[in-house]
Structures are given as C-alpha cells and as structure tokens.
Image: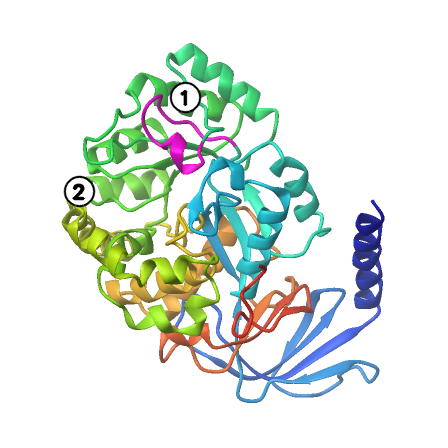
C-alpha cells in the first residue's frame, strides 16, 4: 500500500511540475502524416501539455521557458496501434496465467518506448484490465494509453483458441445468448466489440451468420462499433453488408473486387491490414536482417530471441504445412491494402502484436510500416495511417494524432528523416507525451521488463 501511495504521489508531483513549465522546441523538422513533405525549422511552444503555437521564426517566444534545440531532428506524431493484445505473452509463452497487472503495465511501457502512445487491445482481456484501463485513460499509470474491446466473441471449440490465453472470450451458441452477452459487455463500456469469423484454413468451426448478425445488431443498438477478425473475402463482404464497422485483418484468400471496394467506401468501414502478422508466421524460417537488430531484440520477451534463432525453430517453420499459405497470404494482403487505400478506404495501423511472443510489441508497429511501404504506399501516407488515422478511429483527432496548434504535444523525435526511408522511424531519440519526455527509445533497454 505504501508503494502505491508513493507512486501516485510521484504522478501528482510530476503533473504539478509539468504544468508550471513552458517548453519551446526549436529548429524542428515536422513530418505529419498523409503527405510527403517536411515542415522545416519549426518552433513549437508547449504549455500544459498542449501545443499553443507553431512558428518558423523565433519572435515573441516566452523568456522564462525551457528551450530544447532539435536541429537535425525530425518529429512525427506518436503511433496508434489499432489492433494489439495486452497481458497474454510472457517469456516464450502465451497463456491466461500470464495476464497480471504487472505484465500489462510492462507491456504498456514497452509500447511507449517504441513511440506507440495508444493501443486498442482487441478482445482478449481479463477483468483486472478494467481498473487499469480507467487509470490509464486518466493518466495515472505510465505507458501507452489503453483502449479495449474487453471480452471478444468467438466460437466454442474454435477461434480464438483457448490454449492461446483467450479464455475470457464469449462463445455464444444461440443468437439470444449472443444478444444477452452483448448487453452484459456493453455495461462495461468497451471501445469496440470484437468478433472472430475465421476457420483458420478449415481447421476449426467458424462463427455462424445468425450469431454474428445478432452480435452486430445488438452492438449497434447499444451504440458500439464492431470489429471483425476475418480472412476470407466473402465473409468480409457479408459482414460489411450487415453493417460491420472495422475489418481488423487483411483479406487474404483472394484480391478484393470493385464491388467490395465500393461497399467499403459507401459504408465507411475502417481497414486494419496487420501485414506483419503474416510475415512473422514464416519469417523465422530464415534469418531476416532485422532479427539481429538491437531495435528488434529490445522488444522481445526473455528467451524469444534464442527460440526464433534456434535450428529447431527454423525447421519447425520450414516443415509447417501452413507456411506456404502464410507466404501467399501476405502477398495477397499487400495487394489488397494498396487497392483499398488507393480507392479511398479509411485505413489504420494494427499489428496483432502481443498475441504471440513472435509478434513483439513495439517492433511490430515499425515493421508494419515498412511492409506498407513495400506494398506501394509512400512513407508519408504510412505515417498518416499510423498516427492521425488511428486517432480518427478512436474519435481523438480533435486533440491528438498530428503535430499542430491546439493538440496535445505527443510526438516522437527521430534522428533521421522518415520520408526518405520509413525505417528511420526506428531511429528514436525521444518520445514525448503531453510535452513531457517519457522515453529515450528502446535501444539499450529491454523495454519495460
């Protein structure tokens, strides 16, 4: 109890000190998303965590302020992961027993070290997340801010597998049962409701249409949006026709057609491609260049590096009959992302990081951005997807998601220009939340552990 009191006192004191200071960031190069241009030699004035002015000249700046010289540095908004998972992984395992308050807090810090300020955790929570979510949103615990689908909806004997730490998921067997479960969940105020509609290559039962219809309709009656784990185009089509709000994974069985693209635009559905999920499924068959990068290794749970670089693990991936399917899936996913984005479908960044130890929190978000560029998007477009578009999805774009006057001073300071190479988002100098430095990046630290 004494430790808790000291922690809260430290938070309050930090807030008081912070509120009394004005910060002036000078000579910054600002890269906001959705356009490939740099605002050079900018001066930002931050008071009480808010950007109150932005100038190209140093006129009329406050005298009694703290000045920070950002010559040669580049600023991007903090990142938004709109499909992650908290508390499930620990060491080389993913299990319900790993879900503790300490583990969740560590993972929030890890995300923040990598410049991720906000995480939408997609439907695999335990009850202990509720007070953590409330404290996180109130700014009382450090790390990325929690948004959550709380308890998702799956299938008995099917997705998501209970053995993967997904024991709290609802698994209704009738439409009436599904409606009642939506009502009970709505009382806990989830940010979205998550459903799994996938048979994982025919290996398990898929949610029946009458069940997901009941969930979507009841969620909408309660004013809650619905996000779906999907794989197949025809499942996605039926769900979007029904009123689905968010597609939480790429469509990976075939390329999307013009009718589906038009439907997505008409219904204003948000698309979250999670390209890195498919890459991580087979990447360790070889030794990708990033495997030995300290930026990757700092994101890993203990023992994971040794596991994925072992000969036994490489052979396991190589001999897995699902590996060819995963490789083909990523190629289709990349083509679908490009087609949907170019057609004007709203797109946000998500990774499914934290569901498995091989999908590390923090690194995955940067790898996702690189894969998006490989798919044909520009670095500026990808930065917009990873920042402002995530804020829009959560209804936060009026105060977050871009570096501009009137918004919270949440940004990542980089040592190189991300528009010339998207991998430069990994050259993190510092992370700021509401004008306060919260991290110097992950290098040299096994983040949050």
Point out the stretch of residues depicted in magenta: 151-166
Q: Residues within 10 Å of mark 1 (few under 14, many from 20)?
A: many
Magenta span has 152? Answer: yes
Q: Position of residue 125 (x, y in %)?
A: 53, 36
Q: Is residue 385 visible?
A: no
Q: What residue does disc 2 label?
A: 253
Q: Position of residue 159 (x, y in %)?
A: 33, 31
Q: Position of residue 250 (x, y in %)?
A: 28, 46
Q: Is residue 53 above or below residue 388?
A: below
Q: How is the image coloured?
A: rainbow
| Circle 1 or circle 2, nearest the eye | 1
Image label count: 2
392, 248: nearer the viewer: 248
Q: Residues within 10 Å of mark 2 (few under 14, many from 20)?
A: some
Magenta span has 377? Answer: no
Q: Which residue is painted at 49% across and 36% down in the image?
A: 96
Q: What residue does disc 1 label?
A: 171
* Residue 329 falls left or right of residue 439: left
Q: Quadrant of residue 128?
A: top right
| Label of residue 74 in the image | none
Q: Is residue 444 above or below residue 382?
A: below
Magenta stretch: dominant SS? loop
Q: Is residue 437 above or below residue 386?
A: below
Q: Which residue is painted at 79% across and 67% down in the image?
A: 18
Mark 1 element type:
loop
């Amino acid at each position: 109890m004494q430790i808790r009191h000291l922690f809260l006192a430290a938070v309050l004191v930090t807030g008081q000190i912070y509120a009394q200071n004005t910060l002036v960031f000078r000579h910054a190069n600002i890269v906001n998303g959705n356009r490939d241009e740099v605002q050079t030699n900018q001066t930002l004035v931050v008071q009480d965590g808010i950007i109150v002015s932005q100038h190209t000249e140093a006129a009329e700046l406050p005298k009694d302020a703290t000045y920070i010289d950002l010559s040669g540095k580049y600023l991007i908004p903090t990142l938004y992961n709109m499909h992650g998972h908290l508390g499930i992984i620990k060491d080389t395992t993913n299990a319900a027993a790993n879900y503790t308050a300490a583990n969740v807090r560590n993972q929030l810090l890890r995300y923040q070290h990598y410049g991720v300020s906000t995480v939408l955790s997609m439907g695999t929570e335990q009850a202990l997340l509720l007070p953590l979510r409330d404290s996180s949103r109130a700014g009382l615990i450090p790390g990325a801010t929690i948004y959550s689908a709380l308890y998702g909806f799956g299938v008995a004997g099917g997705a998501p597998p209970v053995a993967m730490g997904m024991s709290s998921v609802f698994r209704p067997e009738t439409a009436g049962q599904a409606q009642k479960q939506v009502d009970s969940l709505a009382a806990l105020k989830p940010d979205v409701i998550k459903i799994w509609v996938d048979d994982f290559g025919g290996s398990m039962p898929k949610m029946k249409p009458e069940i997901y219809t009941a969930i979507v309709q009841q969620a909408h009656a309660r004013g809650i949006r619905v996000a779906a784990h999907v794989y197949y185009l025809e499942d996605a089509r039926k769900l979007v026709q029904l009123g689905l709000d968010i597609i939480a994974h790429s469509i990976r069985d075939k390329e999307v057609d013009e009718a589906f693209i038009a439907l997505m635009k008409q219904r204003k559905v948000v698309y979250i491609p999670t390209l890195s999920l498919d890459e991580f499924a087979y990447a360790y068959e070889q030794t990708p260049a990033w495997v030995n990068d300290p930026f990757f290794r700092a994101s890993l749970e203990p023992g994971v590096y040794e596991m994925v670089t072992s000969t036994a693990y490489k052979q396991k991936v190589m001999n897995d009959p699902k590996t060819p399917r995963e490789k083909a899936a990523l190629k289709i996913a990349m083509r679908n992302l490009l087609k949907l984005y170019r057609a004007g479908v709203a797109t946000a960044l998500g990774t499914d990081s934290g569901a498995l130890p091989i999908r590390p929190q923090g690194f995955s978000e940067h790898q996702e951005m690189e894969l998006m560029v490989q798919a044909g998007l520009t670095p500026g477009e990808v930065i917009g997807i990873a920042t402002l578009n995530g804020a829009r999805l959560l209804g936060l774009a009026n105060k977050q998601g871009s570096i501009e006057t009137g918004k919270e001073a949440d940004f990542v300071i980089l040592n190189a220009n991300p528009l010339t190479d998207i991998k430069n988002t990994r050259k993190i100098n510092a992370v700021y939340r509401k004008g306060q430095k919260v991290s110097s990046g992950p290098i040299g630290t096994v983040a949050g552990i």
